Each structure stands twice: as C-alpha cells, then as structure tokens.
Image (cartoon, rainbow, N blue to C red):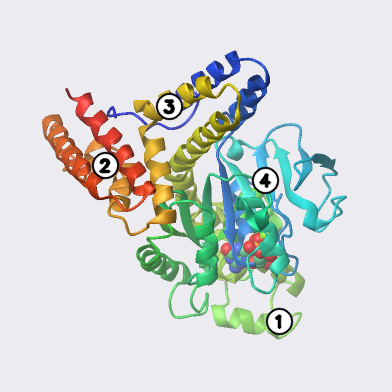
C-alpha cells in the first residue's frame, strides 16, 4: 500500500478504476461473448456509485433525495407513499424507464407521480430508472425507496425485492446499490436494523441520518432547540449504532429541499417577515383562531409551514426581512445538508467505490466458474485480487463476508481500522507524526501476528480476512523497503 494508494478514489485517474479497466480490456480480447461481458461490467465501473436511501415510512427519504438533487423530482406528500424503488441518475435527455423483475425495460411518460400508471402491475416492477441532467448526480447516483413498515408489507417487499439478492429465491433484476443512507427520526426499530443488515453492507458504507431534525424532541415550542437537541442525540446514536452505521448526521431535509429547489418566493419572504411581531406560542394560537387574527391570510401561513415547517415559521422570520435569498441561506445552514453532502461525497462515496469494485471482482469470479474460457479468466481475476492497488477492495470484501458469517471475529476491528484510516499512520493506529521506519516496523509486527492466527481460524471467511490483512501489511512493509 503506497501512502496515497486508495486515498483518492474518485474519477478516471483512480488506480482501482485503471486496473479493473485494463482487466476488462484483456477479458474483451478473448472475443466472442466476453466482449459483451466486458462492456456490461465496464458500464458498472464507469457509472457513479449507487447510494440507496432507506428507512421507515414517512421518515423523509424522498424529501432528502429532492434536497440532494436540488429539484423536486421524488414524490413527497403527507399522505401518498413512495411505492416503487426509483434510481436517479445523471443523464440527458430527461427520461424514465420502468425495469420489470425479468430485467426488461420500457419507457414511461415523465409526468408520472409515484402512483401514476407505469403500464405494469407494481408487483412486476423492480425499479424505475430516471435519468436527468443534474450536477449533484455527477459523482453519485441516488436511489429512493418505499418506506419500511409492518403495516405496508407490499412496500417493504418492493424495497427488498430490488435491493436484496436472492430475495424470494428468485434471481430478479436488482439495483445493485453500493452504499446506504439509513434514515430514522428517533431510535431505529429492531426490524429496520435487521433489514439493513440483510442489505449486506458494512458500517463503513452505511450512513445514519437523524431526519426531521427541525421537529426533534418537543419541536419548536419545546424548551430546547430541536436542532441542537438532534445534534446531541445523533452523537448518542452514533455510538449506540456503531455496529450498523459509520456515523449519524442530523438533517432537516424539508428545509434543505425548500432552499435548494427554489420554491421559496419573495412573496413568501414578505409574508414571513410580516409575522415578526408575534411570540412563537402566540403565532400558533392566532393561526388557530381563524382568518384575520394574523396579518397574513391563513392559507398563506399554511403554505409557509409546508415550505419551511413550524421551525422555519418561527426562526425564519428574522432572515425573511432580508428577502428570499437570505431565507434560503438560513434554511441551508439550519438544515445540516452541507455536512451531510460532505460525508456523502467523501467517506461514503469512497467506500461505495470500493464496494462496487468488489462486486465487479465477484462478477469476474462467477464468470471464471461458468465460462468455457475459464483458465484465462481465472488468470485475470487472480492478478486483480493480488494487485497492490486493489488491497482495500479485498479488505472491504473480507470485512463484508466476516460480518455476515462471524461478526465477533477479532479481524473485524482490524479490517475496519485499516479501511477507515485516511493515511497509513491512521490505518495502523499510529501517531500521525510516526516516521516511516516505525510504521514499517508496526506493519511487520502485525504481519507476524496475522501469520500466527492463520493456525487457529474458525471459518473460511476468517481465512480470507487473514489473506487480505497479510496483503495489506505486506504492501505497507514493501513501500518503505
Ligand atoms: N418538518 C419536517 N418535515 C419533513 C422533513 N422531511 C420530510 N418532512 C415531511 O414528512 C412527510 C413525508 O416526507 P417524505 O419525504 O415523503 O417521506 P418518505 O420517507 O419518502 O415517505 P414514504 O415514501 O411514504 O416512505 C412530508 O409531508 C414531508 O414534507 C423535515 O426535515 N422536517
Ligand atoms: Mg418517499
């Protein structure tokens, strides 16, 4: 592992992409149907990683997707539920296709809401694939899902069918997500956590979002500021859910959606500013008292609540005196969307890219079993698996299978630390100023200890983990030889 290897997972210049791309060119050079396989896998490699947004009914998933995309494309409503899985991918022209569980695709009109006619029964739909030109979608593809709830078994089934391989023992079309954003507005329930575990991600590529932060606790009329309270609670949840998510970030998606979709007008700002003279409790009392009690008609106050929530109605009044632009700036800051975007774009995306590379290696592995040209393919896969540029891909694959089969194995912590580190020193848990020779000695020690453990493994997954650890430490040792 070189000091920079795997740290700049990003665009076409990333070494992981280059190595896999070269492997796919070799695959295609065998000709025949392998050209098609290479192209199919190459399309996965060169498209942005897919991040799926999951969580219980009405957690605010679609609102957050809109906020991140910066356009009101995902259906949100107080009553209507999202009923199909929808993939939002950058691309022109703007269009939508429905993908059925047998894998076939057909175009659907763009005017659809989630409940519009897709031309097939919902139980036949794997997902809707929506392309739209969006700067926000150039580095990640977002996947919105129907909410999980025991009351809506059909919706939960739609999400599972599209996301979990082998669900219902059928090999159905699947969206192949690479990372998850898990939304909850208090403590997640046990069934939500077990769903998440069945998605087959690690905590490194699962991010927790404490949603609707603007209404947290007792809301805007409570003694505590809901957003501050949510920040504190997110810290508690991060520690409590460390086995499931890498971090928990509080977000008020509604505030971000309004700020980023241009929905808030100068007229709205004038209405909001006209409410400045009232104390918060008085404001809601007068709103209940009927038309004429407030200087703004009730329907327009309700419009404001739809746009900025009760929290925005109370705290957005000051910024509203400076016009819609100031309100939008305030909404953005209060929503917590920028810190979320930063985590999505850096750590979550980084692990999503590693996860996807692992999926590609697994596809090649499968091909090596079934294809007549198996010897050549096996050679390609084996070179990829031992390539020092792909060390982290192997570490993440090992972590995944260990979490599935033997989550209490000691290697889990070690794999996680190696993957989490942004530098070699961090990966080894060393002092940031440690000189190279010290890092090398530490890696050498770990190598000895990993080799000692190979005598007493409990499972095939643990064996594989020790192979990955050996590769990782070996490449650190080599870097400074
Ligand atoms: N106050 C407040 N309301 C929110 C927030 N996010 C979403 N909502 C509201 O909650 C309701 C549900 O939001 P959606 O985004 O549709 O939730 P969802 O998780 O996609 O719901 P399903 O698809 O039905 O599972 C809508 O009325 C939103 O306006 C938020 O951050 N703050
Ligand atoms: Mg929804």
State the separation of the CA atoms marked 1 and 3: 75 Å
Which quadrant: the N terminus? top left
Circle 3: element type? helix
Residue under label 3: 382
Which quadrant: the C terminus? top left
Q: How many marks?
A: 4
Circle 1: element type? loop
Circle 4: element type? strand
Question: Do the residues under discs 2 and 4 have CB atoms within 8 angstroms?
Answer: no
Residue 206 at x, y = what percent? Answer: 47, 53
Residue under label 2: 427
Q: Say which residue appears at 24% left-offset and 42% top-offset.
A: 426
Question: N-terminal of the two: label 1 or label 3?
Answer: 1
Picture disc at residue 87: 4
Circle 2: element type? helix
* Quadrant location, ligand no. 1: bottom right
Q: Of the residues tagged 1 and 3, which is closer to the observer?
A: 3
Question: N-terminal of the two: label 3 or label 4?
Answer: 4
Judge: label 1 CB < 8 Å from ligand 1: no
Q: Using residue 434 as the reference point, say whether residue 83 is left or right of it.
A: right
């Amino acid at each position: 592992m070189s000091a920079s290897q795997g740290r700049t997972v990003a665009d076409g210049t990333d070494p992981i992409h280059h190595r896999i791309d070269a492997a796919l060119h070799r695959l295609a050079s065998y000709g025949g149907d392998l050209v098609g396989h290479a192209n199919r896998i190459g399309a996965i490699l060169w498209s942005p990683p897919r991040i799926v947004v999951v969580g219980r009914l009405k957690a605010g998933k679609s609102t957050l997707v809109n906020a991140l995309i910066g356009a009101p494309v995902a259906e949100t409503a107080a009553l209507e539920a999202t009923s199909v899985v929808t993939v939002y991918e950058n691309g022109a022209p703007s269009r939508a296709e429905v993908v059925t569980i047998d894998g076939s695709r057909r175009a659907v009109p763009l005017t659809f809401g989630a409940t519009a006619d897709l031309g097939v029964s919902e139980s036949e739909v794997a997902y809707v694939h929506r392309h739209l030109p969006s700067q926000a979608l150039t580095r990640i593809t977002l996947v919105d899902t129907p909410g999980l709830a025991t009351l809506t078994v059909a919706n939960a089934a739609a999400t599972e069918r599209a996301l979990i391989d082998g669900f219902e023992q059928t090999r159905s079309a699947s969206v192949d997500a690479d990372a998850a954003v898990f939304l909850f507005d208090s403590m997640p329930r046990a069934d939500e956590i077990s769903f998440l575990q069945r998605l087959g991600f690690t905590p490194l590529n699962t991010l927790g979002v404490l949603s609707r932060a603007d209404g947290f606790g007792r809301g805007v009329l409570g003694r505590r500021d809901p957003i501050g309270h949510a920040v504190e609670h997110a810290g508690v949840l991060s520690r409590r859910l460390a086995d499931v998510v890498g971090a928990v970030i509080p977000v008020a998606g509604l505030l971000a959606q309004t700020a980023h979709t241009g929905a808030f007008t100068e007229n709205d700002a004038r209405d909001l500013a006209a409410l400045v003279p009232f104390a918060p409790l008085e404001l809601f009392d007068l709103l209940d008292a009927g038309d004429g009690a407030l200087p703004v008609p009730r329907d327009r106050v309700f419009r404001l609540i739809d746009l900025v929530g009760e929290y925005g109605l109370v705290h957005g009044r000051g910024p509203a005196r400076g016009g819609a632009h100031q309100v939008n700036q305030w909404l953005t800051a209060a929503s917590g969307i920028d810190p979320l975007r930063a985590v999505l774009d850096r750590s979550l995306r980084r692990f999503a890219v590693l996860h996807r590379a692992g999926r590609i290696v697994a596809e090649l592995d499968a091909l090596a079993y079934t294809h007549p040209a198996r010897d050549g393919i096996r050679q390609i896969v084996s070179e990829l698996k031992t390539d020092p540029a792909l060390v982290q891909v192997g570490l993440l694959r090992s972590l995944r299978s260990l979490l599935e089969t033997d989550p209490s194995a000691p290697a889990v912590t070690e794999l996680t630390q190696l993957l989490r580190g942004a530098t070699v020193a961090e990966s080894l848990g060393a002092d940031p100023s440690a000189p190279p020779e010290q890092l090398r000695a530490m890696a050498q020690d770990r190598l000895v200890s990993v080799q000692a453990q190979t005598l007493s493994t409990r499972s095939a997954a643990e064996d594989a983990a020790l192979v990955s650890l050996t590769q990782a430490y070996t490449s650190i040792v080599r870097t400074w030889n």
